[in-house]
Image (cartoon, rainbow, N blue to C red):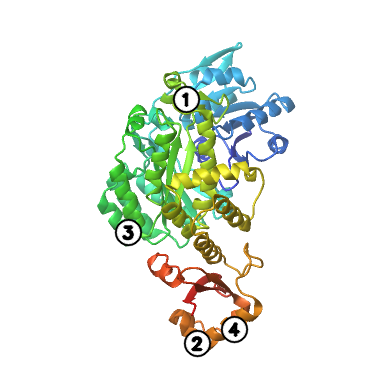
Amino acid sequence: MNVICSTLNAKYIHTNLAIRYLKAYAEPEFTIQIKEYTIKDPVLNIVTDLYQQKPEVIGFSCYIWNIEETIKVVNMIKKVNPSIKIVLGGPEVTYDTHEWMEKIPEADFIVIGEGEQTFKQLLTEIKTTKNFKNVPGIAFRDKEQVVITPQMNKLDLKELPSPYRFPEDITHLGKRVTYIETSRGCPFSCQFCLSSIEVGVRYFDREKIKEDIRYLMANGAKTIKFVDRTFNISRSYAMEMFRFLIDEHLPGTVFQFEITADIMRPEVIEFLNQEAPKGLFRFEIGVQSTNDFTNELVMRKQNFSKLTRTVSMVKEGRKIDQHLDLIAGLPEEDYDSFLKTFNDVFELRPEELQLGFLKMLRGTGVRLRAAEHDYIYMDHSPYEILSNNVLSFDDIVRIKQVEDVLEKYWNDHRMDATVEFLITHVFPSPFDFFQQFGSYWENQGWSRIGHQLEDLFRRLYAFLEYLDVNDLDVIAGLMKYDYLKNHKYKPRKPWWEASFDKDKRTQIYKQISEKPSLLGQSFVDLGLDEKELFKHTMLEEISFDLPQFQTTGKIDKHPSCLLAYFDPINGRTLIFSFLEN
């Protein structure tokens, strides 16, 4: 029997772990082909590729990000070959299953919940007696009536075969994210999250997981992301895995984890700060809200002071990048409360701050009790909220404007010095800067057109000019500093007019050539002659004392010269400065 397990990933770099578990569990009785696409691929291309494999059964893994496109694919497959059996599974169709069977008549079966054993049993029945009532945890049609069978007990995860050992995956390991699972379930009950529905946490066999990680690294995996809902729920387990990864990682590998920051012990962080190589680990931390009443309503236990301690300690260690998440639209969190949440979290200066909007996922408590807070939300995936009793659609639109510029001007880290100055010296708070700029950005129509790097600088400068802010000369200097510092090559045409004409620039280069110690010993060590200065550096005038700023972070209005050296051999940029006479 020719069986395909397929899915539509959000991006090419993503991989789907679920269909690999199905393949591993079904062997050797069934040989399953894995076919992955993206939601951007044309539906006809996907259908053509699947059709040409001449499958008898196709299983699709369904999520909020791919369900709409998956439905289109399934509909077309049934048109070109009605005999192909279509099986749907995954979190999106596990809840409201009867509704999905009615909505997608082309689907022959839906696998509910944990699917490894169920899917294999279903394939056995399709191949043999077709007595589908014997298969636990599925939906199917019997004489046009939808039948849903009771789910089976949870699997013993220690008995599951490895989904990471398929030869056809090896060539992709270095180019895509590899997802790995060491546990299922979550001990918490956050009512906006599907994980709250499953009771308890179950673990895979630790030694098997370690062997799988060794195998993945040996075959070129570079980014390995743990999908455990709370990786550090067991301190002893987390420490064991951290030690293993530190001891046995291969150079260039990055491991990502979702952690609960307020339960992380200081001694664990101290260990990581001392022993972990820089860049080996990356933490994703869901903060969501700092409003205690809101957290109580969604049954979310969070000690923000302890969370702050963890994030701050990790940041001070300078070893691990942190990605913090917020959710706008949680119960009883109005615009002003969310403003406070945003500022509370931004105060921690995470490397990335993700601003998301509440999605009313099927099966979750917030969706089941949506009427209690007058939620209005999208009828189709991703079921994002449009308003509730304390947050209007106007408020949602304004917060989305914040999200847009936050991504461009903070998470991309193109203008760290500039943004830091703006939010501490020019605007009342970080949120005020991102909100005012986001609204201006939207009003200019920039959200509907593309942009290059230089455009980001020009548009920020135009916004600050429009507001007629104080110290615009200082801000312009910081923007030049940020722009040049983050270039790996000498820009052909910067976004500003050059400070010096050719004669003045020649004069300064001559001065530097004669006395390189003006720029410090590290510049002297480069041994650049005047020709190399012209070829590989840029000179700019700054309205403040850049040497002092680089040392102390303080702004003293004394003009200085900035020299950016674009190292052609090592592909790096070095910034030097000296005070003008």
- Label 4 residue SS: helix
Other residues around mark 2 within 10 Å, as few (<14) / some (14–19) / many (≥20): few
Say if mark 4 contacts mark 2, CB within 8 Å: no
The residue under label 2 is 515
Spatial CA distance of label 1 from label 3 is: 43 Å
Image position, residue 122 (x, y; %): 53, 25
Instruction: Provide the residue designation for mark 1.
Output: 388
Specify the amino acid type for callout 2: Lys
Please tell me which residue is depicted at 60% across the width and 71% down the height of the picture.
499
Contact? badges 4 and 1 (CB < 8 Å): no
x, y percentage for residue 170?
56, 52
Any part of residue 263 in sight: no
**Which of pointers 3 and 4 indicates the residue nearer the eye?**
4
Q: Which of the two labelled residues, at mark 1 and mark 3, occupies the earlier sequence position?
A: 3
| Comes first in the chain, label 4 or label 1 | 1
Q: Which residue is mark 4?
A: 507
Q: CA distance from mark 3 to mark 4?
A: 47 Å
238 versus 561 height, above or below:
above
Indicate whether 153 appears above or below 227.
above
Q: Which mark is residue 273?
A: 3
Between marks 4 and 1 in the image, the one whose residue lies nearer the viewer: 4
Give whichever of 101, 411 is nearer the camera: 411
In the image, what residue type sits under mark 1?
A: Asn
